[in-house]
Image (cartoon, rainbow, N blue to C red):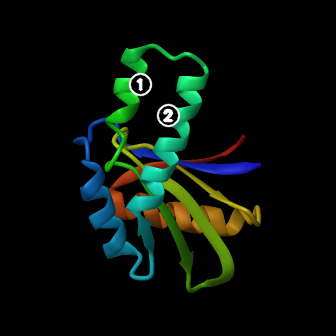
Amino acid sequence: MIVARVYPKLDADHLDVREIARRLRGAFPSIEIDWEAGNDWVATKRKELVAMGAPDVILLSHDSLRNNTAVVKLELADFPGPEARFFICPDSRIEVKTAEGNKTFLQAVSQKIAAGLDYNYRLVED
């Protein structure tokens, strides 16, 4: 599977997750940013950590993701059909995936995300 990794430039200031969301809304007017789905994902992952016996320090760190993680879905007008999905969270890195595996779409959407955030991106085989 091919994915796009979108990440801050080395000399860039850290962007808060809410600033990332604000900039993405500016770049993609029809974007869906779902904070509730982000919280659901965080809760599910926390349950998995508890089941694995994760120590409290890991659970506390994970808990900081609550209300700071969103599931994002977006499409591009130039590419009817494909949809990109990813999470935004405090670490500032974004991994963009598409179920369709459309490399051209993935490159176009990642390039636009990177431009909107003043980030870099690269496509990788995962």
Q: How packed is label 1: few (under 14 Cα within 10 Å), some, or many (20 or more)?
A: some
CA gap, disc 2 and disc 1 = 7 Å
Disc 1 element: helix
Q: Do callouts 2 and 1 mark residues in contact (Cβ within 8 Å)?
A: yes
The amino acid on which the numbered mark 2 sits, given as a three-letter code, is Arg
Q: Residue at x 44, y 62 (%)?
A: 113
Disc 2 element: helix
Name above or below for residue 49 compared with residue 104. above
Q: In this rendering, does residue 29 appear at all?
A: yes
Residue 96: quadrant of the picture: bottom right
In this orientation, which residue lies closer to the viewer: 59 or 4?
59
Decide if residue 37 is on the left or right side of residue 118: right
In this orientation, which residue lies closer to the viewer: 42 or 72?
42
Q: Residue at x 54, y 26 (%)?
A: 49
The amino acid on which the numbered mark 1 sits, given as a three-letter code, is Leu
Q: Which mark is residue 46?
A: 2
In this orientation, which residue lies closer to the viewer: 69 or 106?
69
Q: Which mark is residue 59?
A: 1
Q: How many marks?
A: 2
Quarter of the image with the C terminus is: top right
Name above or below for residue 21 compared with residue 80. above
Q: In this rendering, does residue 94 appear at all?
A: no
Looking at the image, is mark 2 or mark 1 earlier in the sequence? Answer: 2
Find residue 122 and report its horizontal and vertical position in percent. 57, 47
Decide if residue 40 is on the left or right side of residue 118: right
Find residue 30 and report its horizontal and vertical position in percent. 44, 82
Q: How packed is label 2: few (under 14 Cα within 10 Å), some, or many (20 or more)?
A: some
Q: Residue at x 39, y 50 (%)?
A: 69
Q: Which mark is residue 111?
A: none
Decide if residue 70 is on the left or right side of residue 77: left
In this orientation, which residue lies closer to the viewer: 104 or 37?
37
Find residue 46 and report its horizontal and vertical position in percent. 49, 34
